[in-house]
Image: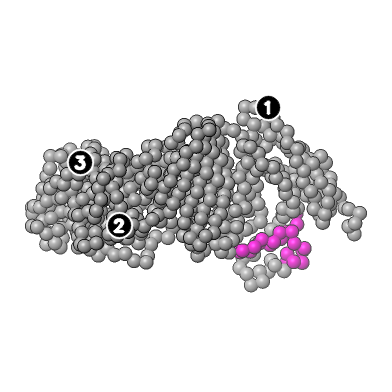
Amino acid sequence: MEPESVQPGQRGVCVTEWRNGERIEIPVEVLGLLDAAAPERTAVLVRLADQRLAGSGVVAGMSGSPVYVDGKLLGAVAFGFIFARDPLAGVTPFAQMRAIAAGPDSAAPPAFPLASLVALAARQVPISEALAAMAVTRPGGPLPVAVGGLPPAGGLAREVLAAAGLEALPAGGGAEVAGVPEAGDMIAALLAWGDAVVAAGGTVTARQGDTLWAFGHPLLSLGSVRLPAARARVVAVQDSYQVPFKLFSVGRPFGTFVADRPAGVLATAGDPPAGVPVRVAVASGGDQRQWLFRMAELPTLEPLLLAYLVQASLTARGAAIGEASVHTELEATFADGRQVTLAHAARGADALAQAAVFAGAACAVFVTSPFPHPPLAAVDVRLSRWEQPLGATIVEATPARTTVSPGETLPVTVRLQPYRAPAVLRSLSIQVPPDALPGDLDLVVADGAAFSDYRLKAEGVEPADFAGLLAEAARLEGSTALVLALESRERGVAYPGASQPALPPSWAATLATGLGRRSPQRLKTAIVASARWTAPYPLEGALRIPLSVRRSLEQP
């Protein structure tokens, strides 16, 4: 039925699934057209005449429920109004939904720079800023999703889902419902599944063979997508003056959502997509637990979904708040077989949040890379957590002498201040390069994360391709590393794909002209030597001690 042919006062029915999977017919009355419902879209305003909706309005989860007038399909219930006392609903005409089509276009997420990940690990970027950089803005506000199998989405988990444009509702247990649904049946779009489920629920508007239309509004307006489509079963309906909603359990997948457009979503029956395997292993106090998940193949959402799964897994077997320490090892595997492993360590009241957001940000660096790259094939996250802030601050570093000779070994004593424990002295040594030039030389002492942040900026690294990005990411050091480095004032040049510090002046001048390359960057310093010690806990701090190099007997 074309919306222009509908007249105020016409009556029809809305078919939707209700408590315990019961299908009901709700009488409707057409009130008129809303021509400004959205750009190039018209909605039909109807009143739902059913005592079950009195005082609360349209129930979240009814989206997509078909509305029939004179025996013809008018469209899908698409929206209601919060704090509504009269159950009015906007109906998306099915004439608009039929135009939904899959295609090659899909939303390209903004790139998350490697420098931002390194700065996050070094605590130079707040967690909230990192989440904002990964956030998805959904038209029309947060999308309610059912979450089950892991702790309720509170605290950071709620913030992560909100950044993904999602709002968590509790989910029921697995529903024993299978097969391809019909118009009026509950349907779910799976964002994560396995040992936990994150699913957006709605209603099928129409089915024609293996093709289904649903929701009457966009999920996240991502264009072409590949999301598992599953049956769902309504368990109960929660009344609310603000936003009433259906509590539902997720059944078996039957197909794939292939398009997410302003007028609704399009699904096809058949084998659902496998998703990206995610393994999260948590060791805590002698207890070890492993969760196996899969997340939707959506680069826009993968970083935030991974952050949520890591955060929820960390709190599933331990305290969700309070001081803690977390060691993270993340291994990402890509479709072409390449792998990269990153390490991270955090302590303090936000240690769990740091670990979760680091995992999500690392994922974002890879899946939003501006370079041609293979899809993410699997993620393995290994976590160790302690419910106390194990760690130490680097408070002092004392070299055996401040005037050194080329080629000599310099002993350095570093004083660490552990949490609520006596200070610890650690002796290390670093070799001065045999070709060190007379003059100033700085001794840098820092935790690995802070040093990685400084090194990336000092070297002016700009990967030129995805292989270069993986190589630079693999150089990221965790804060359990205690790094000693010698930095000279020798100049160099950086350009996309390479960094050339500590060059002879003539070479530096030549390369600085560009040699056909774009935007060469002059470097003022160079790391000429480094040494490391791995601490059993996270470290924090960075120090710089000036040294001088005397002229050796061999030097002219």
* Residue 422 tag number: 1
Marks 3 and 2, how far apart in space?
Answer: 23 Å
Q: Residue at x 11, y 45 (%)?
A: 49
Label 1 CA crowd tier, 10 Å (few <14, some 14–19, many 20+): few
Marks 1 and 3, how far apart in space?
Answer: 62 Å
Asked whether the residues under the numbered discs 3 and 2 touch, taking CB atoms below 8 Å apart as contact, a structural biologist would say no
Q: Is residue 256 magenta?
A: no
Which residue range is magenta in the image? 489-509
Q: Where's residue 31, x and y in %? A: 13, 52
Residue 193 seen in render: yes
Q: Secondary structure at mark 1?
A: loop
Q: The residue under label 3 is which amino acid type?
A: Asn
Q: Secondary structure at mark 3?
A: helix
Q: Where's residue 161, x and y in %? A: 39, 45
Q: Which residue is mark 3?
A: 20
Q: The residue under label 1 is which amino acid type?
A: Pro
Asked whether the residues under the numbered discs 1 and 3 touch, taking CB atoms below 8 Å apart as contact, a structural biologist would say no
Occupied quadrant, residue 41: bottom left
Is 17 placed left or right of 11 in the picture?
right
Q: Residue at x 34, y 50 (%)?
A: 190
